[in-house]
Image: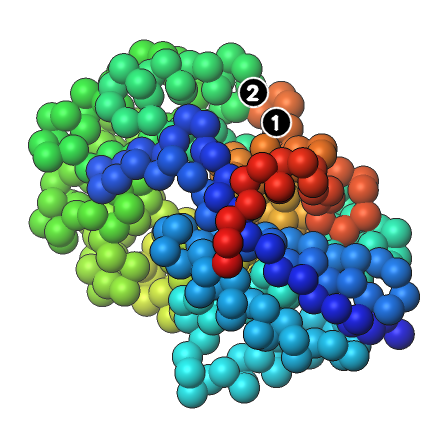
Amino acid sequence: MLTVREVTIRAVNAAIEPPLRNSLNVIPVAPLVIAEIQTEQGPRGTAYAFAYAPQALGPLAALARNLGEGLRGREVAPQALWDEWQDGLRLLGTEGLVQMAVSVLDMALWDALAKAQGLPLVRLLGGAPVPVPAYGSLRGWGPAMLAEEGGRAVAEWGVRAVKCKLGAPTLAADLETVRALRGAVGAETEIFVDYNQGLSRPEALRRGLALQEEGVRWLEEPLPVQDDLGLAELSRRLALPVQGGENWWGPAAMQRSLEAGAVRLCMPDVMKMGGVTGFLRGMAVAAAHRVPLSSHIFVEASAQLLPLAPTRHWLEWLDLAGGLLAEPLRVAGGTVTPPERPGLGIEWNEAALRRFAAEA
């Protein structure tokens, strides 16, 4: 039996180069919380969570640290512990920082379990480390920047799809961006667009109709994630598939949204879903509804989990932690293959962690 001896929580502000840009802001750093679970038997599991805003880094680290204290002496049994956390934290609420803290510990527990067996996580879970098609999730903003970045992604990574952020004040400006990107990536490359929940219902329909005429292949988060009725109506009125799911908090939220017909494609986030355990349960929900499932960021965990998904679609290539790793993942020939290293395949570069260390 594998048991927990100690849980260590560290925080870093990892540089994002180039910075992430969208219609709302520029994100120059990735505030990450790193969990390390040392077992009595030797294997050490690790994972990271993305706090999104530097102001949330300290609270998330503190919450993960407090939850981690309760793991001392416990068996490394991620699914049982996940259910225990969901029940025990129900009155507090299991969304937001709570779910993020649960997730980073859950992922680290699975990492330790796989390392104890000397297997990559995908093999521990009964799958094979097959290549998964990746799309380039672009970081820039505006026609010139996105055209340059998109062309480079196709040329260097061999990806067959790219995604850009939209949400300019006018539809004409958004169309200019899409056309510039199309000119750079060519007719054979699929283009996805993401509005980060920024449109009204009428504007989402107006822009969606125009974008489908441009050959765009998915319309991501055009409306707030809570607006299942609006998203379902938009999905009915567009030929262009509505994509969503990165802001679902757990399998239950995913189930409600898919039952409402809010999206025709889904891309749950392994952290917001509740770690490996939550993502596995979400894959079953997607399979039951026959909805194609892609990933959202967290490329290391996503590469291990997507090969298991019956309806797997795309891996989003937006690497937040690669600069902190001894052996970061790579895109080759438009695909990402999970490494044969045990666990999630995460090995930290300690010098990089010290360089970007944050008080939390």
- Up-down: is 296 above or below 132? below
Name which residue lies at 51% across and 67% down. 62
Tell me: 114 left or right of 242. Answer: right
Q: Are marks 1 and 2 in contact (CB under 8 Å)?
A: yes
Helix, strand or loop at mark 2 = helix
| Residue 184 shows in the view | yes
Residue type pointed to by label 1? Val
Name which residue lies at 46% across and 60% down. 58
Q: Tag 1: Cα neighbours inside 10 Å, few (<14), some, or many (≥20)?
A: many
Q: Check disc 1 and report the residue beneath it.
A: 331
Quick one: 307 or 47, which is closer to the camera? 47
Q: x%, y% of residue 162?
A: 42, 28
Residue 322 found in image quarter: top right
Residue type pointed to by label 2? Trp
First of labels 1, 2 by sequence position: 2
Q: x%, y% of residue 77?
A: 75, 73
| Residue 272 shows in the view | no
Q: Check disc 2 and report the residue beneath it.
A: 157
Quick one: 273 or 210, which is closer to the camera? 273
Name which residue lies at 20% across and 48% down. 198
Helix, strand or loop at mark 1 = loop
Tell me: 46 left or right of 240. Answer: right
Q: Tag 2: Cα neighbours inside 10 Å, few (<14), some, or many (≥20)?
A: some
Tell me: 76 left or right of 304. Answer: right
